[in-house]
Image: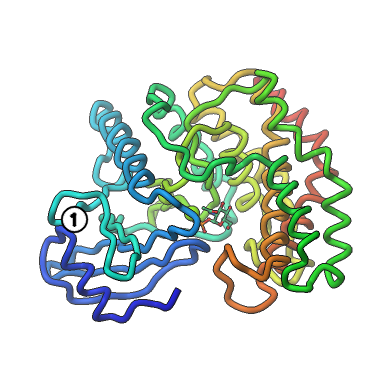
Amino acid sequence: MTQPTNQQVLAVCDRFALAGGVTDVKTCGNGHINSTYIITVESGQRYILQILNTAIFKDPMGVMDNIVAVTDHIRKGLAEAGEDIERGTMRVVLTKDGKNGYTDGEGLFWRAYDFVENTVCRLTVDSPETFARVGEAFGDFQRRLSDFDASKLIESIPNFHNTKKRYADFLAAVERNAAGRVDSVAKEIKFITDRAEKCALIVDALESGDLPLRVTHNDTKLSNILLDEVTEEAVCIIDLDTVMPGLSLYDFGDSIRTGAASAAEDEPDLDKVHFLPEMFKAYARGFIKGTGGALTEREVQMLPDGGYIITLEQAIRFLGDYLDGDTYYHIDYPDHNLVRARTQLKLVAEMEICLPGLREFVISQL
Ligand code: GN1
Ligand code: MG
């Protein structure tokens, strides 16, 4: 996709019900999928304007309907509890004709949100206290949606965390060898294929009824929660594109993947990449508390597997995209997806060693 000019962005802004004329447009963000702008209007009020990647989200209006339904539900809950409805959940800005998004002449799908002020988003976190609060917020998110009618939601990306299918797709990418990179990553491929059976763990537990289906966020990486810039309190969960029926283990797992790690997802120096069991424990405590006792015993027991499998799945996805020639994730340099995959594999290897201790820990929390 060629980036829209400033003029085009301004023309799109004019379609949305912003509170005044635009005075500033900045590109923003570390998202791997969508393109993001920060828009300022005359009053100083700011907005997030995004191009939703419709190669990935095939039904953009369906995604927006999901987000509006979920954020309305959360906002109602916040209001009833006397909590912060301004910053506590995202607010979709409608177009001037009352729609949840806008398709421009080039076919790009745009949507807008209020900017959540005085917050930061982080790629890594040092403090277990902060990470526990993040866990509590994601647990709380799940709790707030526990009475939400899941039949109102479309599945924005079918099989999103079907690790078995992710693995099959990966094997197909190895087979295609579209970018001619297979030989150069034989070691990484073997590491993954050695773990083929693990990929069935969560999917099978769901199919056998061992784990319940809930409404989950499905993309709970650390940078998808905004923290208060002063207090580091968890303020607002963002990036709701993949909110849909899912498993508590997915949400738990993706936060562990990113927050119980000593370095960013794309740290090139693997000596700096470590799994941090103490951060896992802090998050687990917060998450279990946030869900308000809603997790079943089996879910709690399997939380460590959530961290492990989601990290393995992410390695599979990054490496698969590398083999395909980087068609899915935005990259900043040619080997970016490979670097990302390697950090994930390093974490997987370290998690494997820690799993027995982590299982004991979560059971002690029951
Ligand atoms: C993508 O959009 P973003 O950057 O928050 C991806 C997630 C991955 C993540 C890896 C729709 O999330 O599933 O975990 O990159 N989102 C989609 O950083 O594929
Ligand atoms: Mg996303």
Q: Is residue 199 visible?
A: yes
For residue 11, side relative to residue 322 (left or right): left
Q: In this view, does 260 lie above or below 294?
A: below
Q: Is residue 97 above or below residue 364?
A: below
Q: Can residue 276 be seen in this view?
A: no
State the scheme by which the image is colored. Answer: rainbow
Residue 200: % across, % down:
76, 35
Q: Is residue 44 above or below residue 65?
A: below
| Residue underneath mark 1 | 95
Residue 179: % across, % down:
73, 72
Foreground: 331 or 292?
331
Is the residue marked 1 within 8 Å of ligand 2, measured from its CB? no
Q: Who's the residue at 35% across and 65% down the image?
A: 108
Q: In this view, does 338 lie above or below 366?
A: below
Q: Who's the residue at 28% across and 80% down the image?
A: 6
Q: Who's the residue at 74% across and 47% down the image?
A: 167
Instruction: Give the residue type that dot 1 points to.
Output: Thr
Residue 127: % across, % down:
57, 51
- Give the quarter of the image for residue 321: bottom right
Foreground: 278 or 310?
310
Q: In which quarter of the image is the N terminus?
A: bottom left
Q: In this figure, what is the number of numbered marks?
A: 1
How packed is label 1: few (under 14 Cα within 10 Å), some, or many (20 or more)? many
Judged from the image, the secondary structure of the residue bearing numbered disc 1 is loop
Q: Quadrant of the C terminus?
A: top right
Q: Who's the residue at 43% across and 48% down the image?
A: 241
